[in-house]
């Protein structure tokens, strides 16, 4: 049997049990990081223990929605649970994307429990040089 002496971890565990697992109608929160890397924004979501096929990524207009479901691991009939702290259920996060991002070219990778999205900046939003025409003026004819 596993022993634990940290009373605050026990309070966190009890709070999670009372709140219950996330469901499709009331999902739990999903931690994330977001940063700009050159000509793209990168958003990384922590969803360890989630199978790749249990992740849904949708974009509708400028709303990005990520949903993931952590399912119980298969166990033999003889297994007796001694401790269960890993949350199960549905996790979600919604992000409003700026109009300056190209939602048609979002790339997604999932490795080591981290879902990483790269969202490129739209070409129309990138800085560009404006050429200045010659000093010739057209004369208006009357």
Image (spheres, rainbow, N blue to C red):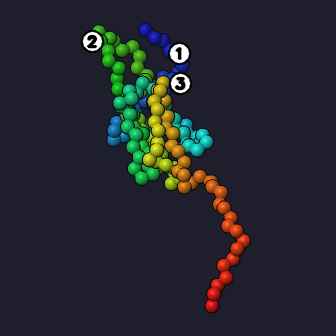
Q: CA distance from mark 2 to mark 3?
A: 32 Å
Q: CA distance from mark 1 to mark 2?
A: 30 Å
Q: Which class describes the residues within 10 Å of circle 3: few (<14), some (14-19), or many (20+)?
A: few
Relative to 81, residue 141 above or below? below
* First of labels 2, 3 by sequence position: 3
* First of labels 1, 2 by sequence position: 1
Relative to 87, residue 126 above or below? below
Give SS at disc 3: helix
Would you say 63 lies left or right of 73 here? right
Q: Which of the two marks, 1 or 2, is nearer to us in this view?
A: 2
Q: Which of the two marks, 2 or 3, is nearer to us in this view?
A: 2
* Residue in the picture at 63% in, 55% down: 128
Q: Position of residue 38 (x, y in %)?
A: 61, 42
* Residue in the picture at 56% in, 54% down: 125
Relative to 79, residue 65 above or below? below
Q: Position of residue 39 (x, y in %)?
A: 58, 44
**In the foreground, 20 or 38:** 38
Give SS at disc 1: loop
Q: Position of residue 91 (x, y in %)?
A: 41, 35
**In the foreground, 55 or 80:** 55
* Residue in the picture at 53% in, 15% down: 5
Q: Farthest residue in the right direction?
A: 135
Q: Quadrant of the C terminus?
A: bottom right
- The circle on residue 77 is 2
Q: Which class describes the residues within 10 Å of circle 2: few (<14), some (14-19), or many (20+)?
A: few
What residue did someone put label 1 on?
A: 5
When asked about the image quadrant of residue 139, the answer is bottom right
**In the foreground, 7 or 135:** 135
Q: Quadrant of the N terminus?
A: top left
Q: Inspect this view and state whether residue 49 appears.
A: yes
């Amino acid at each position: 049997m596993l022993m634990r002496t940290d009373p605050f971890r026990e309070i966190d565990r009890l709070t999670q049990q009372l709140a219950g697992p996330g469901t499709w109608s009331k999902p739990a929160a999903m931690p994330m990081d977001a940063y700009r890397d050159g000509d793209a924004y990168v958003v990384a979501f922590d969803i360890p223990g989630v199978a790749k096929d249990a992740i849904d990524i949708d974009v509708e207009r400028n709303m990005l929605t990520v949903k993931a479901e952590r399912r119980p691991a298969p166990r033999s009939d003889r297994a007796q649970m001694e401790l269960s702290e890993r949350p199960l259920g549905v996790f979600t996060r919604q992000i409003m994307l700026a109009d300056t991002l190209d939602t048609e070219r979002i790339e997604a990778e999932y490795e080591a429990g981290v879902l990483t999205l790269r969202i490129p900046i739209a070409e129309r939003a990138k800085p560009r040089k404006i050429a200045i025409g010659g000093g010739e003026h057209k004369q208006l004819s009357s």
